[in-house]
Image (cartoon, grey):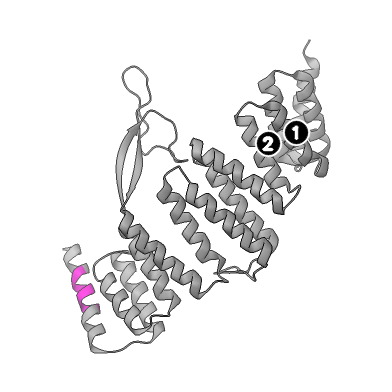
Amino acid sequence: MKRILVILLSLATLTAMAQETFTQEEYLRRYKNLVARVGASGVGVETLLNRWAEAYPEDVQQMLARFSFCYSRCQTTRLEQKPVDRYLGREPILPMTDSLGNKCNYFEVTDFDEELYAQANLAIDQAIAAAPEHLDYRLVKLDAMMAFEQGNPDMTLQQLKALADYHFKQHPAWVYEGMGEVDNDQFKAFMQDYCVALFRLGTPGGSEAFKAFSEYLLTYCKDEPLYLNNLGSYYLTKKDFKKAQKYFDQVLKKDPGNSTALKNCILMARSKKDLNLEKKYLAQMARNGETETDRASAQARLDALATKK
């Protein structure tokens, strides 16, 4: 009954559309109301989008709506069993073990229709071309691309590099819906979010893209602690402690209380079972830690180590 009601409401909307011409604002209002009832790719949405595009082909909101429609339609999800704790950075939907105690977790896996994804990509490209100052549109494209590539983010890496080139060479006056203007520090923070997202994919491709993009950003932002810490973390996961320490020490030379670098150095020292090295970084954390909690915890650990023979 509920589905029948939704279809009737959608048909009522389409009947009204056929009888009159709307303003751009009215199309947007009706689109939002319809999506709220039936979802981004539900009954009647495509017809509304087609009429909107015919009436106002240059309307950016119509292009964004087309992207949402195609991107929603191009995805189907299913459950898949995998013997891992995380998949593409996500927790299992159903965490389980078999009778022998082996992991057999179930994850939600997304399959993409390539043709519909291409249509979504075309729509967001049109929106970017129409409003090149909107950083949020470019990030929407990157988010969709990273999801589509499923742990092998080759295209995403190239797009990220191209966006960094454009920002640092052209210095555009970015805007972001709901935020207003985006300054250089905010842009660098957005790029760090993508570095973290690449790392959290937990795949060889994601890890190498994380390293490559962090290195690329350092060509524009020399000695930036965010990206130096990234490289330290990369080499720490590879157990190349010498290279990891080199990058973390570069951060600490510039920012002696940098929490990320200090915590990773302490972790590295414990992995190496190097008590003297651990004490060195604990002492630095106790003196310069960013928070009172960090400083107190480091001092407590130092005191505990001092009582051991």
At label 1, which amino acid type do we have? Lys
Q: Which residues are magenta?
A: 7-13
- SS under mark 1: helix
- In the figure, is residue 161 to the left or right of 40? right
Q: Residue at x 31, y 72 (%)?
A: 34
Q: Are the residues at dot 1 and dot 2 in contact (C-beta closer than 8 Å)? A: yes
The kind of residue on which mark 2 rests is Gly
For the image shown, how many numbered marks are present on the structure? 2
Instruction: For mark 2, give the secondary structure.
Output: helix
Residue position for label 1: 246
**Is residue 119 toward the left or the right of residue 243 in the image?**
left
Q: Nearer the viewer, residue 130 or 233?
A: 130
Sort mark 2 into few (<14), some (14-19) or many (20+) by Cα contacts within 10 Å: many
Q: Residue furthest bottom?
A: 20
Pick whichever of labels 1 and 2 is earlier in the sequence.
2
In this view, the residue in front, 99 or 24, is 24
Disc 2: which residue:
232
Residue 215 visible (yes or no): yes
In this view, the residue in front, 27 or 132, is 132
State whether residue 65 is above or below residue 54. Answer: above
Asked whether 207 falls inside the magenta stretch, the response is no
Task: Quarter of the image for the N terminus: give it.
Answer: bottom left
Q: Is residue 79 left or right of residue 178?
A: left
User: Which quadrant, please, contains the C terminus?
Assistant: top right
